[in-house]
Image (cartoon, rainbow, N blue to C red):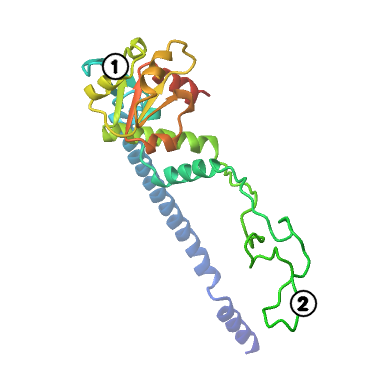
Amino acid sequence: MPAKKVAVKKSARGGRSPHVASAARPASKKALDARRSSLSVRRTSVAKSKTKSVRKSASSPLASGRSSAPKLSASVYDLKGKAIGRVTLPSEVFGVEENPHLLAQAVRVYLANQRQGTVSTKTRGEVQGSTRKIYRQKGTGRARHGGIRAPIFVHGGIVFGPKPREFSLSMPQKMRRLALFTALSGKVKDGELKILGGLEKIQPKTKFMAKAFKALDINGKTLLVTPSGSKNLENVFKAARNIEGIKIMTADTLNTYDVLDNTALVLMKESIDTIKKHFLKV
């Protein structure tokens, strides 16, 4: 009797009998094999769909890179305002997306760097004058005072006045160039960019430059960009320097603030090559 009870307890604690366990093992292996085969089938189907999508995207014209993208071009005008041809503009410079936050940061840095920070005022200890007490402390009926150069008196020191300090801010070169390219791209999109050809042959007279700008319908503040390093631009400077609202800059000194501050942007045809060499160099 006790032996049978022990056998019953072992079977109850162990759960399945050895006969049942041996029968269940091959069934679990079959289930695992079935699951593995179904997972492999799903993976192969997903991989095939991905390869198909990659092939479709590769065959589309948008995935072919910069070569399939439309090239930017602009008309070239002569001094009489007539179109004499077209010039290709680098998309890296004139085809950048808008980024107003970057433009605002570049303008803030530029304006901060224009401040000299040399203003200075004198305190009561630096103002020239006597430090003697002007009258006795009591008995006069007047307010009590010390030296005559106190800030409360005329010609006295200044309290919390400005002192020399550094206002300059720094900005990474890549961000500065990207901000400039964004500003130039905005001029192209707004139609405020004009390219002049043959401007180096102009006579050093203000009336000829004024006629050229009038023929191009350019009014208001204008930025005239000339190529750098050329020696034949003296006539251009002499012809444009006396016209109100015109600022002359070389292509290698362009900055975001001057591009945005002027309504029209006039580029000499040769200045485009200068922009490429100076701002797109590795």
Q: Amino acid at mark 1?
A: Phe
Residue 49 picture quarter:
top left
Marks 2 and 1 sit apart, C-alpha to C-alpha, by: 77 Å
Residue under numbered circle 1 = 208
Q: Position of residue 25 (x, y in %)?
A: 50, 61
Does residue 11 lie above or below 258 as drawn? Answer: below
Q: Amino acid at mark 2?
A: Arg
Residue 65 relative to residue 148: left or right = left
Determine the secondary structure under disc 2.
Answer: loop
Residue 84 relative to residue 267: left or right = left
Q: Position of residue 265 (x, y in %)?
A: 34, 29
**Closer mark to the observer between disc 2 and disc 1:** 2
Answer few, some or many: residues within 10 Å of disc 2's Cα (few below 14, many 20 plus, some between 14 and 19): few
Most distant residue in the bottom direction: 1
Does residue 125 lie above or below 281 as drawn? Answer: below
Q: Position of residue 5 (x, y in %)?
A: 61, 87
Camera-side residue: 267 or 132? 132
Dots 2 and 1: beta carbons under 8 Å?
no
Q: Which mark is residue 98?
A: none
Give the residue drawn at x 75%, y 82%.
138
User: Which quadrant does the N terminus fall into?
Assistant: bottom right
Residue 11 picture quarter:
bottom right
Q: Which mark is residue 136?
A: 2
- Which label's residue is closer to the chain start, 2 or 1? 2
Camera-side residue: 275 or 118? 118
Residue 148 relative to residue 23: left or right = right
Q: Is residue 26 visible?
A: yes
Does residue 33 lie above or below 170 as drawn? Answer: below
